[in-house]
């Protein structure tokens, strides 16, 4: 276990960093063959959003995000985004979590309707340099967990697609509970599970199997908040 001692502030993204994913229909069910294709092909924002929605849709619940909600309303009011009242949409925004020669970008994905954001866990993706070490990858994932905490996210779990040059992996994280009141807490423990073959993870998950039986690496990290 290692300790991430620095604290990244919760920066509301500039509107220019927020992007609507266009031309995808999230509510169409994915077939098993489509899921297999997604997990065995190079990463894309569109495919990741469809897969993440499909595996979480049964547990999604409305939540409020004041700053991003205001930006979304402005885009819709100006006609920049044409939104169907009956549809579920997805946006992603470029966070400020990056490190030259290690992580080129980190993105957070959010599902929303015209009335609310929808979620049950945080959905992220990050792009790692080909030669970035596993230690540096874990530090980037730890920043994602830290963002969940400092932004007062209502969710204590998160998924991260990890893109490298020729393949992508997957991480599942859980911010572990604590009995200490938040005002007296300056650090939290996070459990991170790394799966190098997303196809096996999602096959087990969607077929009712035990994902813990899949070969993976598990870490516990402490992060300052």
Image: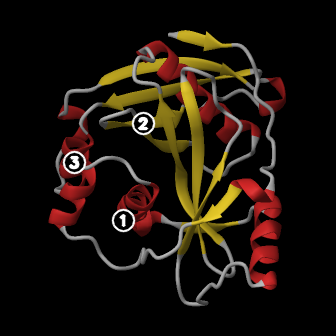
What residue appears at the point 17 percent right and 64 percent down from the top-left corner?
32
Q: Position of residue 129 (x, y in %)?
A: 46, 25
- Of tags 2 and 1, which is closer to the observer? 2
Question: Closer to the camera, 6 or 41?
Answer: 41
Residue 179 sits in which quadrant?
A: top right
Task: Name the residue that disc number 1 marks.
Answer: 54
Q: Mark 3 packing: few (<14 Cα in 10 Å), some, or many (20+)?
A: some
* Location of mark 2 (residue): 162
Q: Residue at x 48, y 19 (%)?
A: 220
Q: CA distance from mark 3 to mark 2?
A: 14 Å
Residue beneath disc 3: 40
Q: Secondary structure at mark 2?
A: strand
Dot 3 and dot 2 residues touching (CB under 8 Å) = no
Could you tell me how many numbered marks the image carries?
3
Q: Nearer the viewer, residue 164 or 185?
A: 164
Q: Is residue 169 left or right of residue 96?
A: left
Mark 2 nearby-residue class (10 Å; few <14, some 14–19, many ≥20)? many
Which numbered mark, 1 or 3, is in the foreground of this view? 3
Asked if residue 206 is positioned above or below residue 126 in the image, the reply reads below
Q: Position of residue 27 (x, y in %)?
A: 40, 78
Residue toward you, 78 or 139: 78
Q: Earlier in the sequence, mark 3 or mark 2?
A: 3
Image-based side of 203 in relation to 46, left or right: left
Residue at 64%, 30% in the rendered image = 98
Name which residue lies at 67% across and 79% down.
Answer: 81
**Residue situated furthest bottom in the rendering:** 85
Q: Earlier in the sequence, mark 1 or mark 3?
A: 3
Q: How far apart, in angstroms, are the residues tagged by discs 1 and 3? A: 17 Å
Left or right: where does residue 103 sit relative to residue 152? left
The quarter of the rendered structure image containing the C terminus is top right
| 84 or 7: nearer the viewer | 84
């Amino acid at each position: 276990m290692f300790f991430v001692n620095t604290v990244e502030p919760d920066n509301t993204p500039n509107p220019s960093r927020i992007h609507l994913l266009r031309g995808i229909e999230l509510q169409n069910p994915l077939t098993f063959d489509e899921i297999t294709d997604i997990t065995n092909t190079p990463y894309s924002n569109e495919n990741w959003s469809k897969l993440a929605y499909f595996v979480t849709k049964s547990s999604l619940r409305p939540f409020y995000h004041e700053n991003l909600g205001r930006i979304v309303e402005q885009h819709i009011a100006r006609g920049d985004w044409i939104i169907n009242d009956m549809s579920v949409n997805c946006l992603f925004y470029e966070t400020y979590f990056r490190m030259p020669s290690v992580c080129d970008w980190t993105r957070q994905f959010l599902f929303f309707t015209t009335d609310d954001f929808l979620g049950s866990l945080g959905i992220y993706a990050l792009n790692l340099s080909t030669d970035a070490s596993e230690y540096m990858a874990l530090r980037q994932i730890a920043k994602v967990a830290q963002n969940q905490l400092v932004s007062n996210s209502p969710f204590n779990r998160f998924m991260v697609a990890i893109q490298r040059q020729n393949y992508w992996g997957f991480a599942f994280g859980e911010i572990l509970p604590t009995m200490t009141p938040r005002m007296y807490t300056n650090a939290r423990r996070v459990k991170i599970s790394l799966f190098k073959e997303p196809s096996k993870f999602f096959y087990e998950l969607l077929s009712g199997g035990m994902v813990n039986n899949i070969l993976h690496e598990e870490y516990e990290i402490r992060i300052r908040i």
